[in-house]
Amino acid sequence: MFQAFDNPGPDRPLARAQWMALLARAPLGLLESALHEQATSPARWLRAPETGLMMVQGRAGGTGERFNLGEVSVTRCALRVANPSDAGDATVGVAYVLGRSHRQVQLAALADALLQDPAQQPVLDAQLLEPIRAYLRHTQAERQARAASTKVDFFTVARESGSDNEEEAE
């Protein structure tokens, strides 16, 4: 689930693709709590939130030929936010989110626009992106723990059955 952009190394600047990937997977509650002050800032819609379908592809075994797996609901939007550090400049924020939550995609696009301002980026990284990273790490650890609880150690079973056969042979 995690890609290289989820864990930026020390002294490595955050790239837009990295934070957009995090914002796309962020739950609505985290976005709401981190952006409650900025959510009221004036923004002009370039593309209002709209929901559509997108084809998802898969690979057999992760390495085989691609095949169409099915369609998923995706919501997207684009907005323009006045940049507080530059009085005349405006920044465009874009977001795509799985599902149908118009509020979630609006907040993700707002966060994208605000993160493009170098003055706000360190604050938003600490208040927004770090909690998202922690949330994603926690959900991945839970998923791995659930999967590990169903693991069967076939080597042990084979070894035990093999030792019984050797005793019978003697």
Image (cartoon, grey):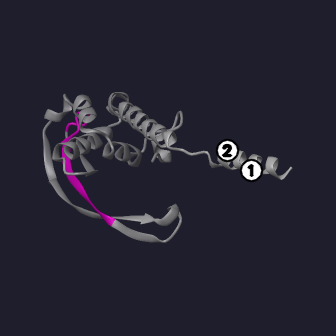
Three-letter amino acid code at the position of disc 1: Gly
Can I make out residue 90 in this image?
no
**Whether residue 115 can be seen here:** yes
Left or right: residue 39 versus residue 163 is left
Element type at mark 1? helix
Tell me the crowding category of disc 1: few under 14, some 14 to 19, or many 20 or more residues within 10 angstroms, Cα based.
few
* Label 2: how many Cα within 10 Å (few below 14, some 14–19, many 20+): few
Instruction: Spot the residue most to the right.
Output: 170
Please name the residue that numbered disc 2 is placed on. 156
Point out residue 37 in the picture as x, y percentages from the top left corner.
19, 28
Compare marks 1 and 2 and give the one earlier in the sequence. Answer: 2
Residue 1: % across, % down: 45, 48
Gap in angstroms between the C-alphas marked 1 and 2: 10 Å
Q: What amino acid is at disc 2?
A: Thr
Residue segment shown in magenta: 70-87
Report the front residue among 91 and 32: 32
Q: Which residue is mark 1?
A: 162
Q: In the drawing, does residue 99 fall left or right of residue 139? A: left
Instruction: Tell me, yes or no, whether the highlighted magenta stretch contains residue 73.
Output: yes
The residue under the point 22% across, 54% down is 76
